[in-house]
Every structure is written in structure tokens, then in C-alpha cells.
Amino acid sequence: MSETIYDVPAAWAKKAHLNDAKYKKMYAASIKDPDKFWGEQGKRIDWFKPYTKVRNASYKPGKVSIKWYEDGTTNVAYNCVDRHLATRAKQTAIIWEGDDPSESKKITYGQLYTEVCKFANVLKANGVKKGDRVTIYMPMIPEAAYAMLACARIGAVHSIVFGGFSPDSLSGRIEGATSDVVITADEGLRGGRKVPLKVNVDAAAEKVPVKTVIVVKRTGGDVAMKEGRDVWYHEEAAKVSGHCPPAEMKAEDPLFILYTSGSTGKPKGVLHTTGGYLVYAAITHQYVFDYHDGDIYWCTADVGWVTGHSYIVYGPLANGATTLMFEGIPTYPSISRFWDVVDKHKVNTFYTAPTAIRSLMGAGEEPVKRTKRKSLRLLGSVGEPINPEAWEWYHRVVGDRRCPIVDTWWQTETGGILITPLPGATKLKPGSATRPFFGVKPEIVDAEGKVLEGATEGNLVLAESWPGQMRTVYGDHKRFEETYFATYPNKYFTGDGCRRDADGYYWITGRVDDVINVSGHRMGTAEVESALVAHPKVSEAAVVGYPHDIKGQGIYAYVTLMSGEMPSEALRKELVGHVRKEIGPIASPDLIQFSPGLPKTRSGKIMRRILRKIAEDEFGALGDTSTLADPAVVEDLIANRQNKR
Ligand code: PRX
């Protein structure tokens, strides 16, 4: 917790869209009469047929239903591209910065129109129709954005799978979305290394039926093309026109599915729809980043995560912004890369994750200070709690004490930012996401669901619907209701713990469920456990998070081997490799403790609370262990705990 308060810089209070008084007035109006507020805000996008209904949302148990602008029709690609052509055809829409600093290009809105239309026509020519699901497994190249917008243009539903996921994870998501078309590239390029995307798609397609694979040429590496299934994008694109009419979509037609980890079971397909999502992405992009025409805006996320969807592609493009898309990594070819890119493209707004800041902090100030960063005006943070030390470094070293930091709290499920400072309006406290965005009504509840008032701590729920909210778990509405609306009836449960201070500022304390947040990537402990037990030498596994200096949380796995198997360093490596292969490198356990037994209740339930405490080195706080079937197990676990340094 930090006591320092940073006032809104005078220049910001003058120039920004919002100051404190305006924020308070608009916030009060948004809560008092949401229909009026969002009815007006809905007009920030163009509609083919205007809506007459604004909000129709119920969190009633068994009857959860969320609809916004339901009788209006529109098209997301039309809003992100076509409607800007009259005024912005020559303005840069996307600045692409390649992995290799010698490679970059600028795509104007005029060019974006042609590229998106061509991609849409290629999809159509390959049999993709309105409502079909298209899996996108791409590197960070402009074609990833073209593919997303092309799907939106013809009413197909995209499901992006992050390029770091394994073939197994990819096939699970292709199957979950019942998608028979995959868009990929020959290879990705990150930090000078090639990522075998097409090879991974081939491996995934051995497990699930895939009818068509559209392959964008990125590296020109040698890849096998399967006759009758695989087509080269550039060959297909040469055959089609650069015009394609946008499909008229209902506001509640699906826009995309994005898989994300939960506390139990397989990843869930979070479904977002058309009208409300775009309105919410656009309004938050405008106010949170105080976007003005001419700004150069850079979000360092990957389009494989929700941040890339809402704040690289949809929000900025809906606002006619110039959005920077970066293929590489922060440390290549040097640890100054982020700041070199800022100087090269005169970036004004820079939005990244705390884990990146913490890892760069480790290299000291010099790699930052040798760059100018004069163009920077605003910094942002997302994905995990930012510790005050990293916040202060970001503010002092990167932003030269000149740039406010917006610490934005939200989730894949929320579609857009919900709790955040607004740079012209909000005094900052390092480590706090501060105050709710318009229309967002956070509440803090205790375990029984009692709403706690004033300065307090508990679980974070949201009492009202907002337009960007997810509508269902794809193909499993029951799971949607059970995951988010059953714990506290009539409220959306976030899964996060939260503290509210005497100024009404919110401080997210981290997940209270079995989800861990590793370098800003969300990981279900159950997924890692099931990957571990799939190994023939493993009998049982329990996975928990522990505090990690750079990643925020690390993955700590307790593993019980099959009888007759002996623990060894080689086996440890083998298990790490196994999890990487099953899920992907982001799920690699940081520490594996071989343990002859796990702490269980007499009914056989693993007591994860105890495992968490041991992983956190908090042996004094193990709590009640008297219900354990075999209390001696705990002694052994403590004695053999893995060293974190
Ligand atoms: O625990 C919260 C954390 O990330 C979770 C959502 O992860 P995901 O769906 O992958 O979306 C990440 C990008 C929006 C949340 O439940 N989280 C996200 N932003 C913050 C955060 N925790 C603290 N502060 C934040 N600013």
C-alpha cells in the first residue's frame, strides 16, 4: 500500500476531455439513469437501423440475460473502417513495427479498407458464411487485424488463439468453437526466433477436423501445404475484389469468442457481441486514454488476449485513431526496444503490463534514460496488480514524472476497462485502480454476500450491467450463470478480491479463486494439474500460485509420483517440458515439489489453502489442520519446500 498521492498535472486538467467535476457529474448520471446515459453514448457508433431499446439485462438466478441496443443493426468493421474514409482515408490507421527494427510500415484507413475487404472476400470464397466461427492463430502482423475485421465485416465470429499456445490447446479451442476454418501464418517472428505456427496448426488438425487453413506468408519459411485444405492467403487475395459490402448485423449477434481460464475445468469460450461491445470499447478508449485526434497510441498486448482485441483493434479503430502494432518483444534487439519504438514513431500513449515494467526495471535506468521519450504523455497498466515500486519506477524513469499512469482493471469477461483513473480527472495513488468508469457499480461483499460499506475489504462484485459485458459462455449458458452469477445472486462476481479506502478508491488484491495470474496471463490451476497428471509417471498433482518478483505470480506444482517412480532433476525437467507441450510455455511450472502425499481432508479433498501457504512461505499461518486425514504430510511438505530465490 502506498500513501503517496499524485495530483492531476495542471496541463492535463485543462486539455483533457474530463476533469474531476465532469467525471463526477457524468458518473452520477450514468448510475442514476443508465438508459439515458447509454442511450446517448450508443450514438458514438453508426447504426444501419437505430435502436429504440437500450438496456435489457437481468442477473436473476436461472434467468441471466444481457442485451444492449437489441433492436439496432450495425457492423463493427464498417464502424472501424468505412465510416472514417470521408475524413481519414489518408490518415494512418495502423503503424506496424516488426520484430526487426528495420521493418515497419504504415497502413492508412484507405488501405485498411481495401485489405479488410479483400480478406473478407477471401473468407467468402473459401465458404465462410455469417455466423461461422473462424479460428485465428497469428503473429502480430497487420493481417491479424485484417482477419478480425474481415470476420466482423461478413458476420463471421472470430476466435483468436494466442500464438504461444501449443497444438493441443489450439485443437481444444478449435473444437470448442466448432470452427472448421483456421487462419494462420507460415511462421511467427519474436525476438529473432521463429515460431512454428503452421506446423502447430498441422498438429492440431490431426486431432480435430479442419476444412480450410488460410496461410499468410510472413517469414517465407518452408512449410508443408496440404492439398485441398491449405491455401496461401496472397494467392487467394490476388483473385478477389477490394470491395465487400458489410453485413447488417443485429446488436446482439456474436462478434467474437475468446477462450480464457477459469478456476475449474477447461477454458471457457467468452462470447462478446456486436453493438454494446463496440460502444464500450470506443468510449473507454476515448476517455481512459484521453484520446484526441493526432495521438499516436500504442498498446503492447498481443491480439491473442482481450487487451489486444479491445485496445489495439476495436476501440482505437472505432475512434479513428492511429494504433501501433508491435510484432516483437521488449528485450530485442536490446532492452531499450520499447523506448526506441516510442521515439521512432513519436508515441504519445503507451499501455503495457506490470510484468514488462518489472522485468525492465531489473536492468536499471540507463537503457531507458538513453532514449528521449519526449512524445510520451500518458502511461497505462493492465493485467495484474501493479506494485507501488514498479508504479513509481514507471512514473519516474519512463514517464519522467510528467505522465499520469492509468492502472486499468478489467477482464476478458468485461470486454473493456471498468475501474480506472481518468488522466484529467483522477488523483493517482500508486497501486490503486482508483474509481469506477461510467455505468460501473462496484460493490465489495463478504463471503456471505453482505454488501460492505465505506473503507473495507472483501470480494469484488458488480451490481449493474454495462454494454461491454460478456453475454454467455459459448455453447454453455449454464456454466456462464454458475461461474459468474451463482456465488452472489443478482450480482456479477469478478473472482477478484478488493479493498476500498477512505477516499473510495479501489485496490484490486488479486484472484480469490483457483486462477493464477502469471506475467499478466491468466492460468487455471486445474488446467496445469490436468496436464501434469496426464504424464504417465504422475499420480497426483496440485498447483498453486506464489509471489514472484517479475511475473507477479509463479506456478508452484506439488507432484506425487506413481509408486516405483523416483524424483530426479531429469524428471523435473521432463514434467516442465510436458506441461509446455500440453498447454504452452506460459504454463511452465516455476517450481515442482515432489511430495509423497498431499494434504487431504478425510473425505479426500485436497486442502489447497495449506498448499498455498506453504508455497508462500507462510508456515505460521497454516490455520486449522486438524481435519486432515494425515497431519504428518504437512511436516514433510514444509521440510521439502522448493526454494524461490
Ligand atoms: O485478477 C484481475 C487481473 O486480471 C484478471 C483478468 O485477466 P484477463 O481476463 O486475462 O484480462 C486481463 C486484461 C484485461 C482480473 O480478474 N487484473 C487485470 N487488470 C488488473 C488486474 N488486477 C489488478 N489490477 C489491474 N489493473
Image: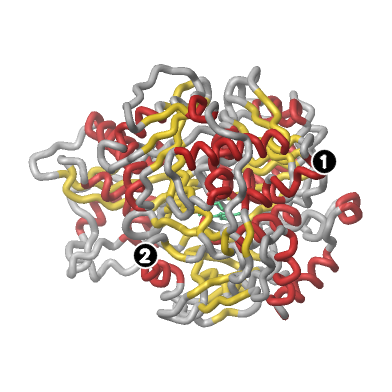
* Residue positioned 34% across, 33% down in the render: 229
Q: Quarter of the image holding residue 28?
A: bottom right
Residue 310's spot in the image, x, y percent?
61, 50
The mark that comes first in sequence, 2 or 1, is 1
Height in image: 369 above or below 510? above
Q: CA distance from mark 2 to mark 1?
A: 43 Å
Height in image: 106 above or below 170? above
- Judge left or right: residue 296 versus residue 209: right
Instruction: Identify which amino acid the numbered label 2 is placed on.
Output: Asp
Q: Nearer the viewer, residue 352 or 633?
A: 352
- Judge left or right: residue 58 versus residue 369: left
Residue under pointer 1: 294
Please indicate, yes or no, whether residue 483 appears anywhere in the rendered image: yes
Q: Quadrant of ligand 1?
A: bottom right
Please indicate, yes or no, whether residue 357 appears anywhere in the rendered image: no
Instruction: Identify which amino acid the numbered label 1 is placed on.
Output: Gly
Residue 61's spot in the image, x, y percent?
43, 80
Residue under pointer 2: 476
Q: Are marks 2 and 1 in contact (CB under 8 Å)?
A: no
* Residue positioned 66% across, 24% down in the render: 104
Q: In the image, is the residue at mark 2 within 8 Å of ligand 1 by its beta carbon?
A: no
Secondary-structure class at tag 1: loop
Q: Nearer the viewer, residue 153 or 540?
A: 153
Secondary-structure class at tag 2: loop
